[in-house]
Image (cartoon, rainbow, N blue to C red):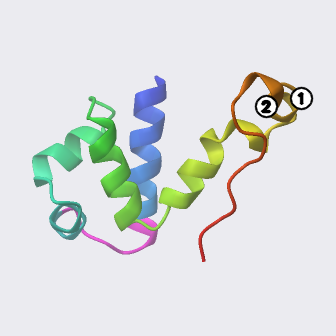
C-alpha cells in the first residue's frame, strides 16, 4: 500500500472510530465530500486539506509531533544544524 493510501486509510479509520460521517467531517473541514473521499482513498490532496481533516478529527497535534525532528534521537543529535535547539512545547 502506498504511503498516501495508508494516511488516507488512517484518516478514514479515525473518522469511523469517532462515529463521524463523511458529510460532517467534510463540512467542518470546509471541503466537499468528494474531496474527503479522495483523501481517504489516498488519491492525493493538498497538505492544507489533510491538516484541516486532521484538525476536525482531533489528531492535528499528533501529526505535528510525528514530524517534529527534535522529537527524535537523530534530530536532537543534529540540532546544531538548525537555528533552533529545542522542540516546541505543546500548547495548552
* Position above or below: 35 against 18: above
Q: Farthest residue in the front direction?
A: 83
Left or right? Give the position of 22 relative to 32.
Answer: right
* Position above or below: 63 against 44: below
The answer to whether residue 58 is magenta is no
Which residue was labeled with disc 1? 77
- Say how many tags the image has: 2
What residue is at 35 percent from the left and 66 percent from the top? 56
State the SS at label 1: helix
Which residue was labeled with disc 2? 75
What residue is at 27 percent from the left and 29 percent from the top? 43
Label 2: few (<14), some (14–19) or many (≥20) C-alpha neighbours in 10 Å: some
Label 1: few (<14), some (14–19) or many (≥20) C-alpha neighbours in 10 Å: few
Q: Which residues are magenta?
A: 16-22
**Labels 2 and 1 touching (C-beta < 8 A):** yes
What residue is at 69 percent from the left and 62 percent from the top? 89
Please give the label number shown on residue 46.
none
Kindly indicate the quadrant of the structure image that contains residue 30: bottom left
Amino acid at each position: 500500500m502506498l504511503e498516501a493510501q495508508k494516511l488516507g486509510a488512517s484518516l478514514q479509520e479515525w473518522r469511523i472510530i469517532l462515529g463521524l460521517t463523511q458529510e460532517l467531517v467534510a463540512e467542518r473541514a470546509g471541503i466537499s465530500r468528494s474531496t474527503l473521499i479522495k483523501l481517504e482513498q489516498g488519491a492525493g490532496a493538498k497538505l492544507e486539506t489533510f491538516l484541516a481533516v486532521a484538525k476536525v478529527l482531533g489528531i492535528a497535534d499528533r501529526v505535528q509531533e510525528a514530524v517534529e525532528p527534535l522529537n527524535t534521537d537523530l534530530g536532537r543529535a543534529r540540532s546544531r544544524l538548525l537555528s533552533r535547539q529545542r522542540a516546541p512545547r505543546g500548547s495548552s
